[in-house]
Image (cartoon, rainbow, N blue to C red):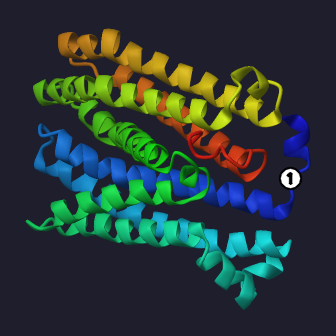
Amino acid sequence: MGGVLAALEPVQIASILVKAGMYVSVLLAAGSVINLWLLTELDAAASRRLRRLAAWSAVVGIVFSALNIPLRAAFFYGGFGGALDPMMLQIALFSPLGLSVEADILGLLGIATIALNRSWTRPVAFLGVVLVAISFALRGHATGDPRLALSTLFVIHILAASFWIGGFYPLYDMAGRGNEAAVRTVERFGQAALVMVGLLVAAGVVILVILAGDPIAVLTQPWGQFLMLKLAVVALLLGLAGLNKLRLTPALEETGDGNPLQSSIRWEAVAFVVILIVTATFTSTVAPEHVGLTCG
């Protein structure tokens, strides 16, 4: 794994940075909308802040998503000169990645309407979330066989991951208040997380089994080592989530002190970002032809 990182070329480094930025912003935008719908205990001020976060994340996501096209053109060309080459850009735009980026941007535009807070914006934003999730099933490994099964699993995987990362901000916001509404919000998220995290892990495991083949052989390859690193951070993240539910949420209810829970949420957010950076590195360097974002 160290040798792979040492041999990174400038286009790969740029790809890692853009992918990481895209993963964080796109999942945060989609997840913020999901949690707006789910966390009904949020007051007007908290809902307004979450709508703004969703909208701004969507705008940033559009920028990062669009940058994938010139970067793919640069990859085809063998250098950054390809990012401005009309032929390379056309090839990238009309590739499966191009279709995925178009769907992603359209979905993010729908999500951005949530900032307007009109009667029609939540349905439009939620459709945007679905389209964003589908966009990840339109590229690379997700287009392999069995196509329908893989696409469905990827949509589930992305929606569940979005739910998780999108919950950090409202939970942190509400935990700082330490009131009854904060306790209800955290408890409601925890109940939903039991289902969503289960779906996240189950979908990821099934995708990996379908695409990776022999699990023992995986461990002998550089990409398998990246995958093990990701799984280790996921285990840490699950441990923090368990701590939140079993100890820190009851403590919030008993004492009204949300500081310990807020601290744990900060570490969860850091761990999630690390997972996405590892995923971006993995998919930009050593991922085999048939394995990719499941791994993110």
State left or right for residue 195 relative to residue 156.
left
The residue located at (24%, 66%) in the rendering is 115
Taking the view exactly as shown, the residue that stands out farthest to the bottom is 86
The residue located at (12%, 30%) in the rendering is 181
Residue 175 in view of the camera: yes
State left or right for residue 9 relative to residue 261.
right
Q: Position of residue 178 (x, y in %)?
A: 21, 25
Q: Which quadrant of the rendered structure holds the N terminus?
A: top right
Q: Looking at the image, how many numbered discs can be counted on the residues?
A: 1
Looking at the image, which is closer to me, 202 or 59?
Answer: 202
Q: Which quadrant of the rendered structure holds the C terminus?
A: top right
Q: Position of residue 64 (x, y in %)?
A: 55, 66
Taking the view exactly as shown, the residue that stands out farthest to the left is 119
Looking at the image, which is closer to me, 41 or 209?
Answer: 209
The residue located at (61%, 26%) in the rendering is 231
Residue 63 in view of the camera: no
State left or right for residue 97 relative to residue 178.
right
Q: Position of residue 10 (x, y in %)?
A: 83, 63
The residue indicated by pointer 1 is 8
Q: Quadrant of residue 48?
A: bottom left
Q: Quadrant of residue 161?
A: top left
Q: Is residue 85 above or below residue 228?
A: below
Q: Amino acid at mark 1?
A: Leu
Numbered disc 1: secondary structure: loop
Taking the view exactly as shown, the residue that stands out farthest to the front is 146
Badge 1 crowding class, 10 Å Cα cut-off, few under 14, some 14 to 19, many 20 or more, is: some
Q: Position of residue 275 (x, y in %)?
A: 59, 37
The residue located at (76%, 87%) in the rendering is 85
